Image: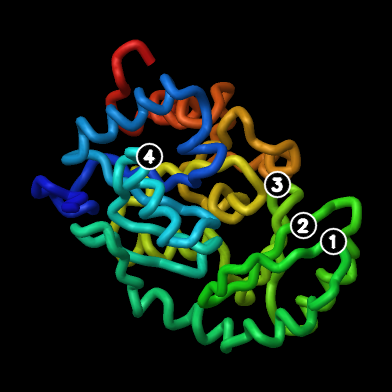
Amino acid sequence: MNVHAAPRPAIAERRFTLATDLDGTFLGGTEAQRAILYDWIEANRDSIGLIFVTGRDPEFIMQMCRERGLPWPEYVVGDVGTTIAHVEADGSITPIAPLEEDIATRWADSGARVRATLDGQPGLSLQPTRFRYRVSYDLTPADFDESAKARVEELGLDWLISDNRYFDVLPRGVSKGPSIRRLVEHLGLAEARVLCAGDTLNDFSMLASGLPAVAVGNSEAALVARLDGIGSVYHAKAHGAAGILEAIAALDLHDSPKGV
């Protein structure tokens, strides 16, 4: 499968780049709203760049593109910012080594000690996937013991709770925000022409990174509260895909689909 069938200008030469979370954001809204956004992107690939910035692992992301007909991104910031990769023409991904070296150094192969430290921790269930530079848990709020946060910090690592149901252990100082900024700089993108989109607390560092950003209308209340007063963030009324289109029009980042 050739996911970039036609030649395109380099992403830095395009008018606008969307850097978007998936669940609840790019995948949010009604089926009709998603179709409007996706068809508009595909019709304008010469002037629109697409980057997925998500907690999902890259293999899952590529599977979703194949099975659900999503527009294929050119780049992926996955695993809550611990993967920064290029999407190849055949749908495979290639990590961008210069951007991941610092992430790997900060992680210092900590998976085993994280799992040992949090083994049996109330309210946390280890996710089966062995990620390269993070350890992830499903969180049960009623059973969660706050001491998990301090235990992670004692390891010299960061914790992140999102949507009140996921607990991620990450390299210190690594998350979606720092990683999308690294990629934007690496690609030579004009910061004012990039829109970051998200809806949960694991998007906070990206939306508060100083790049133009949108919190879509279905964003969790905790995220909206933390973003209060940050002038670079547009708060959309519409949900998911429609909220992204609302922000693109409001910020005059690209010509919008007719009727939107």
Q: Are marks 2 and 3 in contact (CB under 8 Å)?
A: no
Residue that appears at 57% across and 83% down: 106
Q: Amino acid at mark 3?
A: Asp
Dot 2 alpha-carbon crowd within 10 angstroms: few under 14, some 14 to 19, many 20 or more: many
Q: In the image, is residue 80 above or below residue 211?
A: below
Q: Amino acid at mark 2?
A: Leu
**Split into 4 quadrants, where in the image is the C terminus?**
top left
Left or right: 82 in relation to 61: right
Residue that appears at 51% across and 51% down: 210
Q: Which of the two marks, 2 or 3, is nearer to us in this view? A: 2
Q: Callout 1: helix, strand or loop?
A: loop
Percent of width and height locating residue 130 = 56, 74
- The disc placed on residue 68 is 4
- The disc placed on residue 139 is 2
Mark 2 to mark 1 CA distance (whole Å): 6 Å
Q: Callout 3: helix, strand or loop?
A: loop
Dot 1 alpha-carbon crowd within 10 angstroms: few under 14, some 14 to 19, many 20 or more: some
Residue holding disc 1:
123
Residue holding disc 3:
163
Residue 145, image quadrant: bottom right
Q: Amino acid at mark 4?
A: Arg
Residue 180, image quadrant: bottom left
Percent of width and height locating residue 87 = 28, 60
